[in-house]
Amino acid sequence: METTVKADFTSTPRALALPARLATALGGAVRKAPLTLSLVLTFWVVGASTGSLLHGPRDSLRHVVLLESRPSLGHPLTWLASFLWSTNLNGYVWGTIALLTLGVFAEQHLGTGRYAVSLVTTHVLAGATLAASSLVLSQLHPGWTRAFLAIHYGGPTVGVVGATLAASASFRVLWRRRLRAGGLTLFATMALFDGGGVSVLLVAASVIGLVLGQLLVRAVARPSPVGSVHEARTLTSVIVGATALGPLLATVTPNPTGPFAVLGNLVAGVHGSAPRAVRKLCTEDPASAACAMSQLNLHPGIGVTLMACLPALLLLLAATGLRRGSRGAWIAALTLEGALAVVAVADYFLTMADAGTVLAMMSVTDEQPAILLTRLVLPCVVPLAAVVGVLVFGRDLFTVRPPAGYYRALSRRVAALVAASAAIYVAVGLTISGQWRTEPTVGSLLTDFPLRLAPAGLTLGTMPERLPTGPAAHLLFDWIGVAVWSGVCVLVSLGRKNRSTPTGSQNTAAQAILVKHGGPSLAWMGLWRGNQYWFSPAGTTYIPYRAVQGVALTIGDPIGPAAERSAAVKEFAQYCESMSTVPCFYSATAQLETVCRAAGWSSVEIAQETVLRLGSVAFTGKRFQDVRTALNRASREGMRTEWIDYGRASLSTVVQIRAISEEWVAQQQLPEMGFTLGGVDQLNDPHVRCSVVVDSAGSIHAVASWLPIYSAGAVTGWTLDFMRRRTDGFRHGTELLIAQAALDFQAEGYCELSLSGAPLARPEGADVPAGTAEAAASRPDPLDRLLDLVGTRLEPVYGFRSLLRFKAKFQPERRPLYLIYADAAALPAIGRAVARAYVPDASLGMLLRLFNRFTLRRGRESTIRSGAVAPARSSTTPGDGLDPGTGLLDPGTGLHDPTDRDEARTLTPTHP
């Protein structure tokens, strides 16, 4: 009955949860951005009351409330009134989106007063700049000027863009550069290639916003761990990408009028044919080559269109490589830009040979060769030459080279791919010989194949006698080039992976530094196979890391003299920047977090390490009741712990330990994890100690391994690493292993025993009263809240919080472990790298099975909580293998269903 009543009462708040959250969010937005929300309301009320929402203001009102780009200043009220009207419904929608996203953002950073000044000033001055620019540009490019003089504009978008750029002055240096460079590049590309008046307004608003930011905002100097080399690479990448996206924009725009719009025909163009002319030509002579070529131009198909965009797509790929500092991408971008400039000059000079066609197309006379040159050649050559200059000037930025032998191997693979593709083209082409305009031969198809790999805008129709007429021939003709270039891109990406491995001397040097200077509890894991090492110039400090998908993922803190820690962090970041990898300190201590935060890094707590201070451990008193129960039951059932040397252990011992491990691995949904999670292989290390639970018959029930903790040349403690229990073994084996190890290590004179970390788990009872200063200071940021949510959702599968509660039986000291990163934009890449470091061989199917298992558990728990199924109540007492109050069947497993007794043991990893 109680369960049913609880379910009935909890269902009503759930039904009202969404409206309540929306109301709370709206109230918070009103408090944070009152002016923005007032403008949104006024914007729509004014538009609706004047009947302007669908098609803009009526003609009698249009010239008063909409901004015109003519040189005259217009009506005095226009400069302000145009802020509250738009030309059509699309304008109202986009203006509202701009206010609710960028506007709220800018008001929160600027404050309402400075935000209002930025909105009005930018809106008015941008319109005046557009009118003034028309006077200057009318002599240089009259076609472009006429296009944006014809517009009417209204709405808050321009003012919001300027206010956002003004607010960027309060950002950190890194994000300030990115927002400004990205915004200016985007709007300048739109203006130069599309040429619309709104694009020119946005460029003007961006520049005005930057000036206002300097006047209204006092920028705070904050250190940034991301160096100028990284930002210069990113800026160069953006510029090269703009030369690819700009022509694409000009191609898809119906009537582009920008000064560089003609470049679209070169970089991403298929010269179409007029439908009426094609019909006339094919009616007169349907079997002619001209008819076939015109039909192909009229309906080029997706494959031909992609090949027409080949230069732009290759430039985008090169821009991606430039961001990583790749020398090969720099060479590719320089070659492409230079080749396009040469082709532009050659193509248009050949076109100018047919003077009648060109003059008719451009509507000029023989007395205007300078204008002809300005309209045809310079718009192509100038941007390409400028980008070539940027690449040549910044050549020292791109120094990252692939592993030795990469280019030789890539050349062989590409040559094999092209040869195989040519053979397929010839073989299939001969098989469907009846689907070509003229019957092909081996020689004609081999001659035609290189043309299929070139941009379609330059080669389409160059050999009209070899044009396709049937569907299979069209498919082969259109897509063979796409297939080859796609294969080349795959080969390039596969060969780019870093396969470098550390030498044995590096591992030996790292171990010597660790033994001499000591390190944190997880430091020994940095010596495992698969890690790479960075050494300081003096060779006295090293940092172990894994290079995973462009991220340098460290294992704990720098190892070496404490005085060199700050310098090591800075030098390691510079090294990663030179290699175009993202530095990230993983499982770092609070001491390193303090050093990095002072240098401008950001951090998030990812785990709680639990540590026993040895010296007075006795497991007496009520707090240790569960531990004493495990020790007492072990004594009654004839269980004992033994220390063994795994490398010298008997065959029977090794076989039993491996059987326990393999049984555990076979029951898991994912492969055995690595990175900071050890396994049986690590037991072969002579520095690692191993303890087992053995019964009177000599059978092993549980096993654990312990890693040394060094300080000042001596071992001062041990860290729990590998711990697994036999499915049908002694149920208190894990408690027994830890408790007896603590007593044994204490007797041997060691100082501490680390039980490692509990990932995504925070200590309970850490909350502070609401409304206090402590509560405000301790309120988690969005990333912390996200990690809390992830930990809650994954609790049924991995039991992170249950693991922390299990370790709490030993009353340990808790120490936070951090993930420290230099750039928040790299967090998605860091997350992928962490996942891949732990499970490098996990397939998509494995991840889907894990997701299904997680979903089923969530569904079962929801059913129990809703009252449909009565939760099972345990009659066991504390200490008999169930974690009191949690329903866990085995410590650390995180399994909440008693039917899962044999499903897994020690499911949760013991390290973050």
Image (cartoon, rainbow, N blue to C red):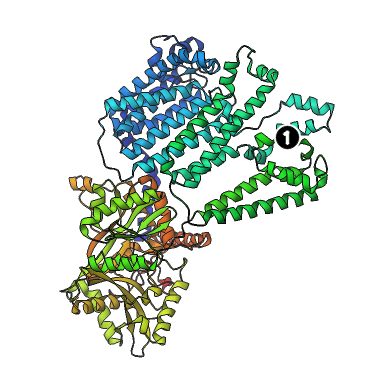
Residue 436 visible in the current orientation: yes
Q: Is residue 345 left or right of residue 213?
A: right
Q: Residue at x 56, y 41 (%)?
A: 314
Residue 222: quarter of image? top left
Q: Position of residue 82 (x, y in %)?
A: 42, 17
Q: In this view, does 167 lie to the left or right of 48?
A: left
Q: Is residue 12 above or below residue 639?
A: above
Q: Residue placed farthest to the bottom in the image?
A: 697
Q: Which residue is drawn at 48% across and 62% down?
A: 842
- All told, the count of numbered labels is 1
Q: Position of residue 458 (x, y in %)?
A: 66, 34
Q: Is residue 485 above or below residue 147?
A: below
Front residue of 827/14: it is 827
Q: Where is residue 685 in the image (x, y as percent from the top left)?
A: 35, 75
Quarter the N terminus occupies: bottom left
Residue 30 visible in the current orientation: no
Front residue of 753/651: it is 651
Residue 283: quarter of image? top right
Q: In this view, does 144 lie above or below 531?
A: above
Q: Where is residue 805 in the image (x, y as percent from the top left)?
A: 28, 65
Q: Residue at x 35, y 56 (%)?
A: 6
Q: Residue at x 40, y 19 (%)?
A: 126
Label 1 crowd (10 A; few <14 / some 14-19 / many >=20): some
Mark 1 secondary-structure assignment: loop
Q: Is residue 877 above or below residue 1?
A: below
Quarter the C terminus occupies: bottom left
Amino acid type, label 1: Gly
Q: Which residue in the protein does label 1 denote?
A: 461
